[in-house]
Image (cartoon, rainbow, N blue to C red):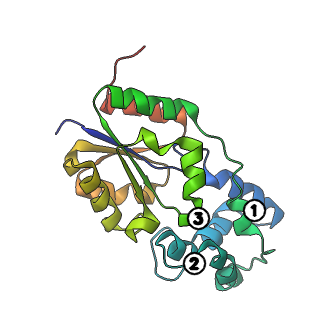
Amino acid sequence: MAAIRAVVFDFGGVLISPIVEKVAVMAEAHDTTMHELLHVLLGPRESGPDHPWHRCERGEINVAEIQPGLGPWAAAAGISLRGDEIELLMDGGYRVLDEVIAHIDVLRAAGYRTGLLTNTFAEFRPKMDADIGFHHFDAVVESFAVQARKPELAIYEATREMLDVDHDEIVYLDDFDQNLEPALALGWQVIHVTGPEQSLAALQEIAPVPRP
């Protein structure tokens, strides 16, 4: 097994609190489950050409076009949307996981290259940079910029190229298991994140750094 040279982080659920926390709160108001509403608002686990959230993450439409395009998905699930769901998801209200951000600098000091690999929108870029700081990363790979989203293979290939390492020299952290499967297929090591303490402990096993 090759030595790890690069550590790649997802954004939501890894560097900030998971988006499913916000969806769960909204689901209660809609009298449905978190998983049902997640499917309606963010689309299916697999990446498809039609869901507006997926299309926006690939840079095909803008954020303002997502909510009007959700009607068929909501109707199929028997959910009545109020019309402000995407606005509520985009208004922030998450927690930055400062202990994980701090560890990125420790990794860089130890000689690892670091990357951010995220499905996101062009409109959200300034807030993301302000909240976590892109200066912590050697490569920032955003779905809208490369016109591919996780779990599409092209975005992982773009990440490897930007980091200038081999696939088997990368470890990747993500809280959505479907986004880990293509990375594994390419030879990356992966960590399925369930919380910051768990992710940092698992990362220390794969990409060790001197402890303070």
Q: Work out whether 160 lies above or below 102.
A: below
Q: Is residue 121 visible?
A: no
Residue type highlighted by circle 2: Pro
Label 3's element?
helix
Mark on residue 27? 1
User: Mark 3 against mark 2, which lies toward the viewer?
Assistant: 3
Residue at the spot 54% in from the left edge and 48% down from the top edge: 129
Mark 1 neighbour class, 10 Å CA radius: few under 14, some 14 to 19, many 20 or more: some
Question: Which residue position is annotated with label 2?
Answer: 52
x and y percent of residue 146 in the render? 38, 67
x and y percent of residue 90 in the render? 67, 60
Q: Quadrant of residue 138?
A: top left
Q: Earlier in the sequence, mark 1 or mark 3?
A: 1
Could you give the CA–CA distance between mark 1 and mark 3, rounded to whole angstroms? 25 Å
Could you give the CA–CA distance between mark 3 and mark 2, rounded to whole angstroms? 15 Å
User: Mark 1 against mark 3, which lies toward the viewer?
Assistant: 3
Residue type highlighted by circle 1: Ala
Could you give the CA–CA distance between mark 1 and mark 2, rounded to whole angstroms? 19 Å
55 sits left or right of 185 in the view: right
Mark 3 neighbour class, 10 Å CA radius: few under 14, some 14 to 19, many 20 or more: some
Quick one: 42 or 100, which is closer to the camera? 100
Residue type highlighted by circle 3: Glu
